[in-house]
Structures are given as C-alpha cells and as structure tokens.
Amino acid sequence: MAATLLYGSIAVAEMRVWEDTSGKQVKARFDRELFGSVELRRPDGSLYSIPLENLSPQDLRYLRTRIPPEIEIEVRTLKREKERNKNATRSEFEQFSDEIEVVTANVLIRQKSSADFEGALRAEIYFIGREVATPEIYRLSAKSTAQVRLTEENQRKFAFGSSADFRIYEEYNKDTRGADYVGYLVVVLDAMGKKLKTRTNVSWLDEDEKIDALRKFYVDAFFDANCRKRSVPRPSYYDARNEF
C-alpha cells in the first residue's frame, strides 16, 4: 500500500488581520477550511470560524492565491517490457543480453477543499531502482516535474504521467548488472516550495529527512535506504583485479 505524508497549511500561513463583510476584524492564522468556512487560529490558540461567503474580497483573494488547497494524490503504475527493434544492426549477443522494463506512473491530484484556488502548485515524481549486484544500494532512475493548476474547468483535478526504463544486462564476464524497479515518490509543493503532500509505495521512505535528501539527488545517483549517497557499485572483476 502506498504511504501518504501530509504537511498542513498552518506551517506556511502567516499571522494577519482577517475581516468579514460586516467589518469585524480578527488577528489570526489560517488553520483549515471546513464545511464551507475558514477556521482561523488566534495568537492565544483559540479558533475563530468565518463562512466563505462572509469573507472580505481582499481575504478571499488571499485565500485563493496564497493558501494552497487540501489535496489528495492517486498513483497508478504500469509495467511493460520495452519493445525491441528487430531490424537493429546490433549483434545477436547485444540484441538479447539485456532486458528493459518500462514503468509508467499516472498521477492524479485532486482538490479536496471547496474554495477556489487560483495559484499554481508543483508536482515532482521520482522513480527508484535497486541495484541487482548490490541489493543494499538504490538508484534514482528518473525524475520529472509538472505545474499543477486546479480549476473549475478541469473539475479541480490534474493528471500527468511519467515513465522510466529499468535495464538488467550481462557484462562480458557474465556478471548481471543494472537496476530493478522498486517504487516511486510523488511530492506536491506550493508556490513557495513548501511540501504539501507526498505519496510513495516505498516503505522505508517514510521520513521528511529522507525525502528531502532524495529530492536533491541527480538522476543515476546511488544511495542507501537512509538516503545517503553511495559510490558507483563496482563489478566483481574490478575487485578481483585489485586483489590480484
């Protein structure tokens, strides 16, 4: 089952003065939207609720452009063997000495809250592989990004897809090399780069620090389950040569 990590909007909202259509003001920080109202948290920690239709125009504008909506993420993956060009000029050994699996991830981001949001979010997806020769080492096989807009026209849903190749092959000494597909990580951020929500099917990728570290890696970087960088795995013949 894919794991989901949620980062609350309260972490990025600022303390400010809110006003309703009657002119009543309250100093508070946005806490959440609930049942057609915004709940605001005063400096003393108490909550104050204002229906959306009673918010002043400037506060509605602030809500629609600065406060990211509550969202949920769905991810579906599809695996298939990469089609080969049978008319390729490679030798028979080169033609069949490796296997390539293509993994496609289809991501759907859906807005859960009802208030209109006129800003843009950023979605990132990462594909993770495991080295077959050294199973304790992983590889960032691919990553891509998409700009997310949730509007009435798209029913407050945004879908995008991305894919990565995972190749297993034999070296000339018959050692098996390459990476198997392990899983994905999807991260959604607001305009300021703050994480709103993540989704992954990798069980050990369950801490903010690991996710932040993984996001900084370049494609084809090697790392362990603690998301610490590792050196490029060496083939067995390399070690044997050193011993000799």
Image (cartoon, rainbow, N blue to C red):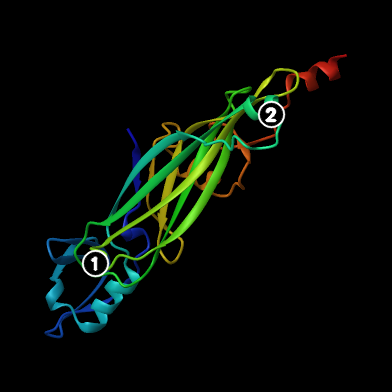
**Distance Cα–Cα, label 1 vs label 2:** 68 Å
Q: Quadrant of the C terminus?
A: top right
The residue drawn where x is 73% and y is 24% is 235
State which tag comes first along the sequence, 1 or 2.
1
Question: 7 or 238: which is nearer to us?
Answer: 238
| Residue 141 position (above or below residue 116) | above
**Residue 140 image point, x, y percent:** 57, 40
The residue drawn where x is 14% and y is 71% is 50
**Residue 163 image point, x, y percent:** 48, 45
**Residue 68 image point, x, y percent:** 32, 64
Question: 124 or 154: which is nearer to us?
Answer: 154
The residue beneath circle 2 is: 94
Q: Secondary structure at mark 2?
A: helix
Three-letter amino acid code at the position of disc 1:
Arg
Disc number placed over residue 42 in the picture, else none: 1
**Residue 188 image point, x, y percent:** 40, 55
| Residue 138 position (above or below residue 185) | above
Q: Secondary structure at mark 1?
A: loop
Closest to the camera, between mark 1 and mark 2, is: 2
Three-letter amino acid code at the position of disc 2:
Glu
| Residue 161 position (above or below residue 104) | below
Q: Would residue 239 be found to the left or right of residue 219 on screen?
A: right
Q: Quadrant of the N terminus?
A: top left
Q: Would residue 107 be found to the left or right of residue 85 on screen?
A: left
Question: 45 or 244: which is nearer to us?
Answer: 244
**Is residue 40 in view from this perspective?**
yes
Q: Would residue 244 be found to the left or right of residue 3 on screen?
A: right
| Residue 227 position (above or below residue 216) | above
Taking the view exactly as shown, the residue that stands out farthest to the front is 87
Tag 2: Cα neighbours inside 10 Å, few (<14), some, or many (≥20)? few
Q: Would residue 150 be found to the left or right of residue 85 on screen?
A: left
